[in-house]
């Protein structure tokens, strides 16, 4: 009998083969109030049933007696962080989280197990013991190239947390805009937030907006990782503090991008709405730059409860190698002195005086080229047992890569038009030679937004590939479990289509995945969808 479909694949799942648990209008949810609210809303969205919730004590005894047909949600306090057990029988469902996050993840799994039945809804009799492979499971949203409002960010948090992602990296600043209001440097959002790529409208988050995002993420067991991209990707600063910036470096590469994608060449003090990268730089040998960064990073650090502060460091092609080395050493130490763990893109691994606690984020290919792996090893070679890597291989899990050549959405620089299968078939431990498993903090799937304007655009690009990234971050290594194969994933992720549809997720039904559809009578069928796109 086929195992029920859960994504990301759990560490262990066994089918009892007995009768399913029936979910009907009278089924009570008993136990932990916060998780009960989350489950109630998930069940309501998926089934239209509004289940009653009851406090914990009554629930415990009901479940132990096995008489009441209840769904019991409890936090046990033992087991690895984020882990849970889900035991479903004909008589009851008990979801036990080691901690609140574990229980939340058990609830997400339960949501995926619901399917329509003649009598209402059912959950198969199954036992799942589940815990993540990596502690850091991230998604990134670029809110600089196109601004995305708080409601959109919350919707992205809903989607990501349901796949057991626990970090939301916000790329808050870039050449095209500065998206976080700072009391210490108000001119940044006053002067440099109004536009996005292509002349689209911009926007920014007030302190209250940013807090609202952090709180919403926290309620979904995600932490926010803010990025202030430095010392390149800083053209926006020229609109507010022109004295801090070098003149743009107009390389052949920049001229080529402008020729291919349109837009004007960057001019300091004028909003940039093109797609070129690597032309801007702060002044590296001017103390005013560091006074600015003490204000900016200090305020961002104070506003952010999470442990990480991302300082960028990518594609600083407008900065000399010597200046880059000096800058990264100094600014990584500034971030660490603010009490945060600095995070930087892999180029920063070359810096001779890098703060030893800095986490590196690798964005090269699954099979690295151009020495990008050597740069990434710079972080783990430092000798601090805190120095680790986050893997974001661009040709696998950059969610902004196109999988339909004819769609205006997405880019193709990371090895051309991509497939869901490419997002799936790689293992985090095999990307960078010489990096031990315990030096991998986790996996993050970035969504850059040069071509991405709306939530519908986000959905169309990120789904289903975000699910493949979730599996790299959460599930056992490729080959370590019978579920960790492309064929299994293609079946399991296809089975999520009715759930995603009920949640309003506008995924792209890529070919090669058995997308399930439910008709009005609750009969499910696997459909091979011809969307004109490859898996
Ligand atoms: C590369 S990879 C970038 C971004 C672009 C992205 C588009 C990296 C750290 N930086 O500046 O938005 O490609 O795919």
Image: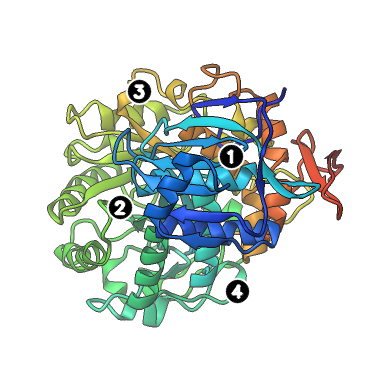
Question: Around disc 3, counting alpha carbons within 10 Å, would you say few (fewer than 14), some (14 to 19), or many (20 or more)?
Answer: some
Which residue is at 20% across, 52% downward? 340
Callout 1: SS = loop
> Quarter holding the C terminus?
top right
Q: Nearer the viewer, mark 3 or mark 1?
A: 1
In primary-sequence order, the first of circles 3 and 1 is 1
Q: CA distance from mark 2 to mark 4?
A: 26 Å
Label for residue 311? 2
Which residue is at 71% across, 43% downward? 403
Instruction: Using residue 68 as the reference point, say whether residue 292 is left or right of it.
Output: left
User: Is residue 454 at all visible to an observer of this figure?
Assistant: yes
User: Is residue 276 at all visible to an observer of this figure?
Assistant: no
Contact, mark 3 vs mark 4 (Cβ under 8 Å): no
Q: Which residue is mark 1?
A: 91
Which residue is at 85% across, 40% downward? 527
Callout 2: SS = strand
Looking at the image, is 199 positioned above or below residue 286? Answer: below
Q: Position of residue 392 (x, y in %)?
A: 47, 38
Instruction: Using residue 39 as the reference point, say whether residue 100 is left or right of it.
Output: left
Q: Which residue is mark 3?
A: 437
Q: Position of residue 457 (x, y in %)?
A: 66, 60
Question: Around disc 1, counting alpha carbons within 10 Å, would you say few (fewer than 14), some (14 to 19), or many (20 or more)?
Answer: some
Q: Which residue is mark 4?
A: 200
Which residue is at 23% across, 56% downward? 284
Q: CA distance from mark 2 to mark 1?
A: 52 Å
Front in this rendered view, residue 434 or 222: 222
Q: CA distance from mark 3 to mark 1?
A: 41 Å
Callout 3: SS = helix
In primary-sequence order, the first of circles 3 and 4 is 4
């Amino acid at each position: 009998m086929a195992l029920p479909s859960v994504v990301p694949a759990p560490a262990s799942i066994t089918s009892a083969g007995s009768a399913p648990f029936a979910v009907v209008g009278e089924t009570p949810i008993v136990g932990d109030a916060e998780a009960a609210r989350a489950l109630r809303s998930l069940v309501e969205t998926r089934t239209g049933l509004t289940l009653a919730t009851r406090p914990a004590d009554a629930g415990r005894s009901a479940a132990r007696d096995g008489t009441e047909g209840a769904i019991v949600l409890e936090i046990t306090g033992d087991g690895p962080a984020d882990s849970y057990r889900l035991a479903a029988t004909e008589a009851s469902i008990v979801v036990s989280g080691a901690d609140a996050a574990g229980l939340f993840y058990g609830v997400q799994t339960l949501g995926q197990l619901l399917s329509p039945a003649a009598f209402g809804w059912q959950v198969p009799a199954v036992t799942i013991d589940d815990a993540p492979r990596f502690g850091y499971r991230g998604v990134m949203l670029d809110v600089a190239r196109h601004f995305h409002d708080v409601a959109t960010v919350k919707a992205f948090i809903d989607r990501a947390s349901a796949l057991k992602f626990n970090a939301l990296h916000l790329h808050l600043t870039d050449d095209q805009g500065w998206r976080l209001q700072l009391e210490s440097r108000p001119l940044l959002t006053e002067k440099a937030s109004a536009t996005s790529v292509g002349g689209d409208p911009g926007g920014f988050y007030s302190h209250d907006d940013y807090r609202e995002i952090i709180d919403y993420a926290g309620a979904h067991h995600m932490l926010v990782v803010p990025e202030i991209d430095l010392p390149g990707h800083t053209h926006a600063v020229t609109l507010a503090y022109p004295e801090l910036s070098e003149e743009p470096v107009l390389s052949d590469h920049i001229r080529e991008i402008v020729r291919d994608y349109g837009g004007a060449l960057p001019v300091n003090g004028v909003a940039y709405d093109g797609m070129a990268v690597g032309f801007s730089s702060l002044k590296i040998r001017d103390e005013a730059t560091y006074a600015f960064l003490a204000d900016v990073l200090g305020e961002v650090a104070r506003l952010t409860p999470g442990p990480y502060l991302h300082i960028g460091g990518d594609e600083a092609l407008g900065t000399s190698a010597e200046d880059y080395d000096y800058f990264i050493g100094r600014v990584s130490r500034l971030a660490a002195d603010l009490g945060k763990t600095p995070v930087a893109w892999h180029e920063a691994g070359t810096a001779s005086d890098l703060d030893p606690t800095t986490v590196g984020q690798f964005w090269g290919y699954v099979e690295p080229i151009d020495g990008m792996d050597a740069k990434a090893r710079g972080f783990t070679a430092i000798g601090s047992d805190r120095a680790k890597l986050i893997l974001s291989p661009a040709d696998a899990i950059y969610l902004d890569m196109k999988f339909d050549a004819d769609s205006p959405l997405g880019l193709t620089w990371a090895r051309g038009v991509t497939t869901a299968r490419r997002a799936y078939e790689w293992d985090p431990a095999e990307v960078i030679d010489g990096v031990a498993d315990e030096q991998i903090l986790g996996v993050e799937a970035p969504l850059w937004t040069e071509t991405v304007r709306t939530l519908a655009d986000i959905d169309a690009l990120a789904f289903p590939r975000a699910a493949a990234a979730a599996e790299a971050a959460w599930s056992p290594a490729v080959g370590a479990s019978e579920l960790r194969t492309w064929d299994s994933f293609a079946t399991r992720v296809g089975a999520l289509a009715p759930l995603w549809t009920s949640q309003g997720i506008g995924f792209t039904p890529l070919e090669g995945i058995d997308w399930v559809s439910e008709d009005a009578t609750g009969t499910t069928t696997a459909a091979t969808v011809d969307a004109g796109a490859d898996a």
